[in-house]
Image: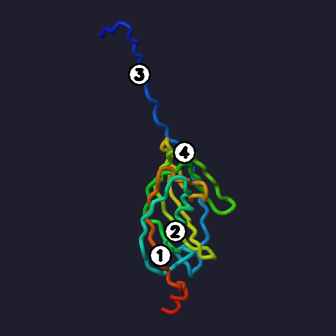
Amino acid sequence: MAARKPGAKPRSKPTAKPALRRRTVPKPAAARPPAPPADRAGTLATLVERGRYGRMVLARIRPNVDLVAGVERICAAHGIAYAVVRSAVGSLVDAALGYGEDESMTLVTVEGPGIEILTLTGEIRPDDAGKPVAALRGTISDSDATVYGGEFVRGGNPICITLEIVLQEWLPELTSFKTQRARD
């Protein structure tokens, strides 16, 4: 046994790490969804749209500007009514994400500062007045590296340092898919 230096604390025996336990969650009995109508077999799409891509915009959203409002402002400033998010990198002060549908939507708030945006996707479409409205979804990570995901809630996602985003304009054809399909 090696001699200890005078005044040194005695070493404690290393404790064994507990074995990782896996928790198995039983799957609920699978309820089979109703079969889709024959004219929509194999798809749950609610909108099929023809069009083409237009201009690309690389923009920066400054600190304390809401993410959703900032994206809408960029589109309005460049005269873009329809767009898709191609890429983004940045951080938020705090975050508010929603998931679920309408009345059953669950709101998750994450307190910052320093919430990193891991992914950001979505689209911008005009409302009835022609003003761009953004529907943005993504994943974020807090300072403890916990990951959250959902739809970014308007007014609840102020930019922290900065956010760089790439938007691509979408130029839809004015005829619907069903009308086009009937003519083909």
The label number, if any, that marks residue 112 in the structure image: 4
Between the residue at mark 3 and the residue at mark 2, the CA separation in whole angstroms equals 54 Å
Callout 3: 10 Å neighbours few (<14), some, many (20+)?
Answer: few
Give whichever of 107, 69 is nearer the camera.
69
Numbered badge on residue 139: none
Of badges 4 and 3, nearer the viewer stands: 4
Q: Where residue 14 is drawn, which disc sits there?
A: 3
Say what amino acid the circle numbered 2 marks: Glu
Mark 1 to mark 4 CA distance (whole Å):
34 Å
Residue identifier under label 2 = 123
For the residues labelled 1 and 2, say whether their Cβ atoms are less than 8 Å apart.
yes
Q: Position of residue 90 (x, y in %)?
A: 46, 54
User: Helix, strand or loop at disc 1?
Assistant: strand
Q: Residue furthest right?
A: 103
Counting residues from the start of the chain, the first of labels 1 and 2 encountered is 2
Q: Which secondary structure, mark 4?
A: loop
- Asked which quadrant contains residue 34, the reply is bottom right
* Residue 23 x/y as whole percent: 53, 42
Q: Residues within 10 Å of mark 1 (few under 14, many from 20)?
A: many
**Residue depth check, mark 4 versus mark 2: number of the one nearer the observer:** 4
Label 4 close to label 2 by CB (< 8 Å) = no
Badge 3 element: loop
The residue tagged with tag 2: helix, strand or loop?
strand
Query: Disc 1 designates what residue?
Result: 170
Q: Identify the mark nearer the N-term, 3 or 2.
A: 3
Q: Kindly report the distance in space between the C-alpha atoms of the residues bearing marks 1 and 2.
A: 9 Å
**Residue at position x 47%, y 30% from top?**
18
- Could you give the CA–CA distance between mark 4 and mark 2, rounded to whole angstroms? 26 Å
The nearer-to-camera label among 1 and 3 is 1
Q: Give the residue type at disc 4.
A: Gly
